[in-house]
Image: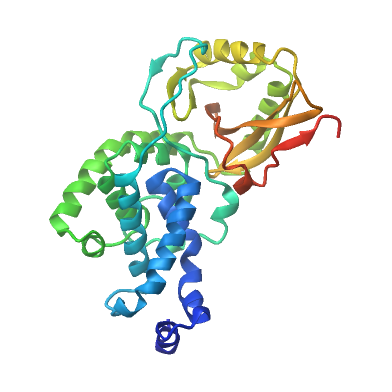
Amino acid sequence: MSDVTLTRARAGDPEAFRSLSDPYRRELQLHCYRILGSVQDAEDMLQETLLAAWRGLDQFEGRSSVRAWLYRIATNRCLNALRDAKRRPLEVYADFPQPSRMGEPTWLEPYPDSLLDGIADQAAGPDARYELKESVALAFVTGLQHLAPRQRAVLVLRDVLGFSATEVAQMLDTSEASVNSGLQRARGALETRARVERERATLPGSAREQELVHRFAEAFVRDDVDTIVALLTDDALLTMPPEPLEYIGPHAIGPFLRDRHATRRGRRMHLVSTRANGQPAFGQYLQDPHAPVLRLNGIIVLTVSQNGISGLTRFRDTAVAGHFGLPRTLPLNP
């Protein structure tokens, strides 16, 4: 950052301000997503952060980097949003098969890989404990949502982004001792989930991943539940945020898929390939019974390991479709 650019930005030059803030837009949006679990809310918080920074630029004294200053604004905006949030009532489908267990409602949306372009692991400081691919995985982000808001903020700032305890204390207007104690509690709550994610992960785009994803897609549109079940690992987990229903293992997931496929009543299905949270994903389209189109019915994200498919996460809310470039409808007979 040059002093000339900062001076011009403080004088009201929008181009100068953009040159200061644009290098951090993508990573700030991802930061907000990790804390909030919603790509739509993250986009809103990014805009609020940039507006607050623009209006308060004269208060920036240069004691920290512009990046750290922007992260301070973004983090506190997210914490305020969580404090003020009113979640919509939870609707659990009564006709779902009996789950393996009931978890907690998880208010989570998938994050399109297209928004990860330009964000490199090198952006993290030397104290970071997680690589980018680990810190965007659904299991990791889901785990964050079960932490207290300030704990998840501390963990992301310290272990994902690598800011020092001193920097995080300044961002949150607290003491280093408070940051360190909160970090230890957050690590303890998240470590098991993060370790499992490391063990399951394969390299994105690997030949093994491509093979399993292709076989899954072919079987899914054919209603071939037996083949899907054969692709699953013994501890595979099927979830449907925000519903608290969890189906664990092929013996539970198989009956669920058969039940769901039965409800289609012969209507055609189509999958459109995409990626979310560094993982293979599909837009799921189902034939409209009243019009000659296929309508977007949900987004499915797969967790793939060398041993098979270890996770299926289905998002029923299609409000994020635009972020993935998924159209609302497809022609029935293209």
Quarter in which the N terminus is drawn: bottom left
Is residue 305 visible in the rendered structure shown here? no
Question: Is 196 left or right of 152, judged from the image as shown?
Answer: right
Q: Residue at x 26, y 46 (%)?
A: 151
Question: Is 159 left or right of 116, judged from the image as shown?
Answer: left
Q: Position of residue 208 (x, y in %)?
A: 63, 35
Q: Quadrant of residue 219?
A: top right
Question: Is 34 left or right of 111, judged from the image as shown?
Answer: left
Q: Residue at x 61, y 17 (%)?
A: 230
Q: Position of residue 332 (x, y in %)?
A: 82, 29
Q: Position of residue 331 (x, y in %)?
A: 81, 34
Is residue 87 visible in the rendered structure shown here? yes
The front one of 36 and 168 is: 36
Q: Residue at x 72, y 23 (%)?
A: 221
Question: Is 196 left or right of 110, judged from the image as shown?
Answer: left
Quarter in which the C terminus is drawn: top right
Color scheme of the displayed model: rainbow
Q: Residue at x 49, y 26 (%)?
A: 240
Q: Position of residue 257 (x, y in %)?
A: 59, 15
Give the residue at the far right of this rendering.
333
